[in-house]
C-alpha cells in the first residue's frame, strides 16, 4: 500500500477540463501490447495504453486522455512502476474532499474502465451485455459463489434533472465474487426509454463509510438488503425519511451519507 502522505494530488489546484479536448484525436493502441498489463505494478505508459485500449472496446468509458494525468503521484517518473488501482481510488476520494465533482466524474469513468480491463483479463471471451431482469423469489434467495450479473439487487427511481425521471439499478459486476463483492449501477431514463451512457462500478470493500457518496450508499444498501433477503428497502427508507434529497444525478456524487449510522441501525 502506497503511503498517502507521499502522494501530492496534482490536480487540486491545476486540473480543469477544457471543452476543446473533447475534439482531440484519440490514440489507437495495440491489443498485443496492453492486454497483459498488471495495473497494480506498471509504468504510466502501460497504464495509459491499457485504459485507452479498454475505452476503444467500450465507448461507455468516455473519459478524456488528459484525465489520466490526474492520477500521477508526486515525484512522478516515466520509468517507475506504480499501483494505479490504488492511486485512482485515492484520487477519487481527494476529488470528493476538494469538491471537484467534474473531476470525480472523470475518475469514476476511469475506475470503471479499470474494473472492466481486469475482468476481461480473467475471461477468454468478452463480457456480454445482458438485460437487467428482476428475480422473483427474494425470500428464498441465497448468495451464489459466482453471482449472476443480470439479477437485480435493488432499484430506485429518482429525479435525474435534465434527464427527467431516472431508474438506477444495482446488479453484481462481472468480476464480483462472494469474498470481494463489486456492484454495477446503471441508469435508465424513463422519459427517453434509454440507458444513460456510463455505469458506476463500486467495490463494497473500498467504500469510505464515514463519507460515502449517495451512489456508494445505494450500492452498499442494495448489497446489504440482498444479503438479508430484502429488496428495495434500505435506500428507499432513507429517501422517505427526508434525511436526503436528490434533485439531479449530480447529487448522487456531491452529497454524502455516513454508512456507519446505517450499520448501527441495521
Image: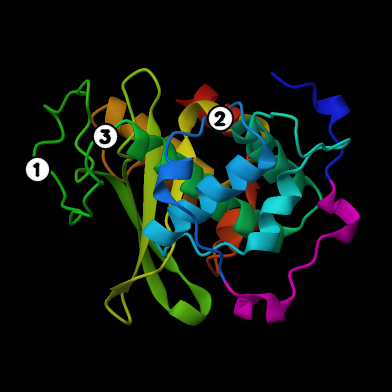
Q: Position of residue 92 (x, y in %)?
A: 67, 45
Residue segment shown in magenta: 10-25
Sequence-wise, which precedes: disc 1 or disc 2? Answer: 1
Q: Which label lies toward us, 3 or 2? A: 3
Mark 1 Cα shell of 10 Å, populated few (<14), some (14-19), many (≥20) = few
Q: Position of residue 98 (x, y in %)?
A: 81, 51
Query: Are the residues tagged 1 and 2 within 8 Å (C-beta)?
Result: no
Point 78% across, 46% down: residue:
97
What residue did someone put label 1 on? Answer: 136
| Colour mode of the rendering | rainbow
Q: Would you place residue 24 above or below residue 234 in this image?
A: below
Left or right: residue 44 versus residue 220 is right
Q: Position of residue 210 (x, y in %)?
A: 67, 32
Q: Secondary structure at mark 3?
A: loop
Sequence-wise, which precedes: disc 1 or disc 3? Answer: 3
Q: Would you place residue 50 above or below residue 83 in this image?
A: below
What residue did someone put label 2 on? Answer: 206
Amino acid at each position: 500500500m502506497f503511503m498517502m502522505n507521499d502522494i501530492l494530488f496534482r490536480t487540486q489546484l491545476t486540473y480543469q477540463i477544457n471543452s476543446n479536448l473533447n475534439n482531440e484525436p484519440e490514440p489507437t493502441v495495440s491489443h498485443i501490447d496492453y492486454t497483459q498489463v498488471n495495473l497494480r505494478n506498471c509504468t504510466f505508459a502501460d497504464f495509459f495504453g491499457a485504459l485507452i485500449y479498454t475505452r476503444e472496446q467500450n465507448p461507455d468509458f468516455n473519459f478524456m486522455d488528459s484525465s489520466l494525468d490526474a492520477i500521477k503521484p508526486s515525484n512522478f517518473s516515466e520509468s517507475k512502476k506504480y499501483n494505479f488501482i490504488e492511486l485512482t481510488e485515492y484520487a477519487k476520494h481527494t476529488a470528493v474532499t476538494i469538491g471537484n465533482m467534474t473531476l470525480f466524474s472523470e475518475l469514476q469513468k476511469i475506475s470503471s474502465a479499470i474494473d472492466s480491463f481486469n475482468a476481461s483479463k480473467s475471461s477468454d471471451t468478452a463480457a456480454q451485455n445482458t438485460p437487467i431482469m428482476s428475480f422473483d423469489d427474494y425470500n428464498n434467495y441465497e448468495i451464489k459463489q459466482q453471482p449472476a450479473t443480470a439479477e437485480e439487487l435493488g432499484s430506485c427511481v429518482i429525479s435525474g434533472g435534465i434527464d427527467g425521471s431516472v431508474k438506477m439499478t444495482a446488479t453484481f459486476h462481472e468480476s464480483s465474487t462472494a469474498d470481494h463483492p463489486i456492484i454495477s449501477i446503471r441508469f435508465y431514463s424513463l422519459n427517453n426509454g434509454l440507458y444513460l451512457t456510463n455505469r458506476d462500478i463500486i467495490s463494497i470493500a473500498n467504500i469510505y463509510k464515514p463519507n460515502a457518496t449517495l451512489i456508494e450508499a445505494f450500492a452498499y444498501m442494495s448489497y446489504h438488503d440482498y444479503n438479508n433477503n430484502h429488496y428495495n428497502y434500505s435506500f428507499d427508507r432513507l429517501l422517505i425519511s427526508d434525511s436526503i434529497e436528490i434533485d439531479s444525478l449530480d447529487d448522487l456524487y456531491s452529497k454524502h451519507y455516513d454508512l456507519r449510522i446505517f450499520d448501527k441501525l441495521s
